[in-house]
Image (tube, helix red, strand yellow):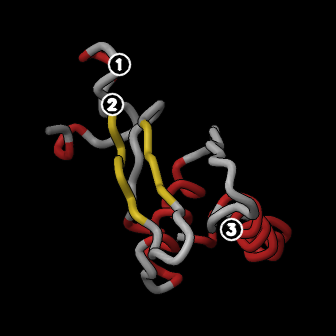
């Protein structure tokens, strides 16, 4: 799968993935609640969900995400991450749901 990307992209990938985990995961300092909106592509969503579920690093490859779908991950102090919503397309009109997925995977 990764052979379709350039050597430069493959070499930059691990650093970008680590930076995303540092920036967008874990509880925040202080007592004030914080909400982050991260607009991204399928692969980063898969990487963040995989990390929240403590899956092995290779597992992000099978976590597919529809275009414009919503995923919510909660990070609370002294608790493991919780995936509250994954791949929700309910806010989209029916004809736009499941875009990015092969027809046989539409439900």
Q: Residue at x 38, y 67 (%)?
A: 62
Disc 3, SS:
helix
Could you say which is closer to the camera, residue 77 or residue 44?
A: 77
Label located before the other in sequence (3 or 1): 3
Label 2: which residue?
Answer: 89
Could you say which is closer to the camera, residue 60 or residue 49?
A: 49
Label 3: which residue?
Answer: 21
Where residue 91 sits in the image (x, y, percent)? 35, 21
Q: Residue at x 74, y 73 (%)?
A: 18
Badge 1 density bin: few <14, some 14–19, many ≥20, Cα 10 Å: few
**Distance from label 3 to label 1 (Cα)?**
28 Å
Quadrant in the picture for residue 16: bottom right
* Residue that extends furthest to the bottom in the rendered view of this protein: 56
Disc 2, SS:
loop
Image quarter hosting the C terminus: top left
Label 1: which residue?
Answer: 92
Where residue 59 sits in the image (x, y, percent)? 43, 77
Could you tell me if the residues under marks 2 and 1 are in contact, i.e. CB atoms within 8 Å? yes
- Residue 23 disc label: none
* 88 is higher (above) or lower (below) than 73: above
Q: Nearer the viewer, mark 3 or mark 1?
A: 3
**Distance from label 3 to label 2 (Cα)?**
24 Å
Res. 95 visible in picture: yes
Badge 3 density bin: few <14, some 14–19, many ≥20, Cα 10 Å: some
**Distance from label 2 to label 1 (Cα)?**
6 Å
* Relative side of 75 to 92, left or right: right
Badge 2 density bin: few <14, some 14–19, many ≥20, Cα 10 Å: some
* 80 is higher (above) or lower (below) than 63: below
Disc 1, SS:
loop
Q: Residue at x 65, y 46 (%)?
A: 34
């Amino acid at each position: 799968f990764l052979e379709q990307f350039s050597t430069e992209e493959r070499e930059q990938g691990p650093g970008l993935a680590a930076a995303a985990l540092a920036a967008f995961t874990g509880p925040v300092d202080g007592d004030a609640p914080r909400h982050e909106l991260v607009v991204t592509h399928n692969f980063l969503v898969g990487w963040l969900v995989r990390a929240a579920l403590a899956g092995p690093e290779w597992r992000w490859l099978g976590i597919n995400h529809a275009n414009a779908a919503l995923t919510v991950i909660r990070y609370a102090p002294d608790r493991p991450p919780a995936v509250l919503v994954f791949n929700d397309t309910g806010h989209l009109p029916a004809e736009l749901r499941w875009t990015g997925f092969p027809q046989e995977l539409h439900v």
